[in-house]
Amino acid sequence: MTDLYEPLLRPYDEKRRAELVAAFTAVEHAAEPVAELRYPALREPALRRVLGEMLALQGRVLIRARPKEWTSGYHDDVAAALAADPACVPPAEERAVLALVLIHSVAIPRASGLLDDDSWLSPHPTPLEELRRRSQLPIGELEAALRRLRNAGLVGQVKAGGDDAGGYVPGPQFHRLTAGARRRLQEELILAAGPDSPLAAAIRARRRGRTAPPADPSRDRERTP
Amino acid sequence: MTPDEHHVDPQVLARARARVLGAPSQPAADPVPPGLTAASDGDRVWLLPAWPDGATPALLEEYDTAPMPLDRAGQARRVLAAALRCCWTRPDDAPWPSGDAQVTDVLEVYAGMSRGDADLARRWATGELRRLADTGWLLVDETAGTVRTGPRTALWHEDTLASLRDLLRRLPAPPASRPEAAAP
């Protein structure tokens, strides 16, 4: 098999090449965003551009998660194409459990001013009991969904300790959202939590303006009481 | 009327899709998208990542960078070792693809490696086998009660296998193969 990355790496000497490969491996596989201090290819704009091209071959982009810290995620167009492929969409139980974790660990604390506006990570765990009650899933199915979500890094478990009952928080994959993906997630949560709110109406109007009108324009009005 | 067309190179999309799905499999006759590593057992082929210059995620260790966290990593490794002890019966060959081993044998080997309650050890190992199957390290057929190595083991470099072979030789041997393994 010919090496996919060879044309991009060939111009560089051994040292630069190793730095590019190390930075690529780090942003793709590390749990958390990595510091550019440790990876020269993240520090230097010219090498960072090559790194971006290496990631683009996988449908990925470089994401600055915090100042001087980097990770990678799917390009918005690739994410949209994958989401349109039924095989790539997680089953309904997993999506339901993940949505509950996002509501309890992010949306509610954010509405109370306990979390900043543009992060999907949270120190506020969603208790297992809450997931059980709200998801209405049999415990076996709930546990299987949580196991798969944890394997995928989409949720993390917080152990009980002190006054805290423990539970689940959004996992490290939430570092990997692009600005566009974070905005869409925020909008989806508003549409789900307050479909009749003025904010939801504004989101729907904006989406209609951006894309061709849906085949059935009455679809958006069905939610109106 | 088509919604928002996304112009994504089909080969790029195929690689992104393989990443999303973990290690997806397809009939061995289907073409493998370029830029992926193919692990075939004859009938099917599993699509795995191809890393630049063969660098594996183990490279992160050299940079003191934490990989994706794994719950109960020690237990997962020991159960994987017990499974390899049973499936990888010709250790001079590569671990992939392997023959089938009985899940009950893997549970026995694991129970023999752990101190304390053997029933509890078997129960833990059962959950761990499922997790290792979800992530492509093992292929488990729950109906048949069999397990074999997973496609991800095909990504192990030959020069890293020596210490693993040594380790496996030191593990308890699986019970002599019986046509009908006794239920625990």
Image (cartoon, helix red, strand yellow):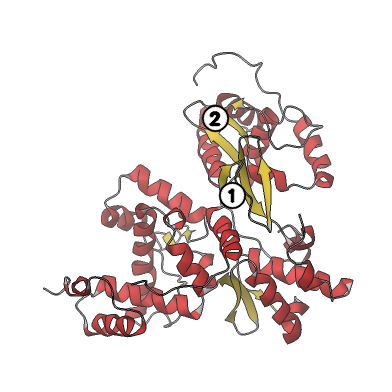
Task: Give residue B132's position: percent from left, percent from top.
Answer: 57, 43
Q: Amino acid at mark 1?
A: Ala
Q: Earlier in the sequence, mark 1 or mark 2?
A: 1
Q: Chain of mark 1?
A: B
User: Tag 1's secondary structure?
Assistant: loop
**Residue lying farthest to the front in this orientation:** B1
Along the viewing direction, whichever of B140 and A223 lies nearer the viewer:
A223
Q: Do circles 1 and 2 both sit on a common chain?
A: yes
Residue A61 visible: yes
Identify the residue at image location x=41%, y=83%: A117
The answer to which quarter of the image holds residue B93 is top right
Task: Give residue B152's position: percent from left, percent from top.
Answer: 66, 46
Identify the residue at image location x=60%, y=14%: B178
Task: Give residue A201's position: percent from left, percent from top.
Answer: 24, 82
Along the viewing direction, whichever of B117 and A136 lies nearer the viewer:
A136
Q: Chain of mark 2?
A: B
The label shown at residue B23 is 1
Along the viewing direction, whichever of A150 and A81 lies nearer the viewer:
A81
Q: Nearer the viewer, mark 1 or mark 2?
A: 1
Identify the residue at image location x=67%, y=23%: B174
Q: Write down the residue under mark 2.
A: B117
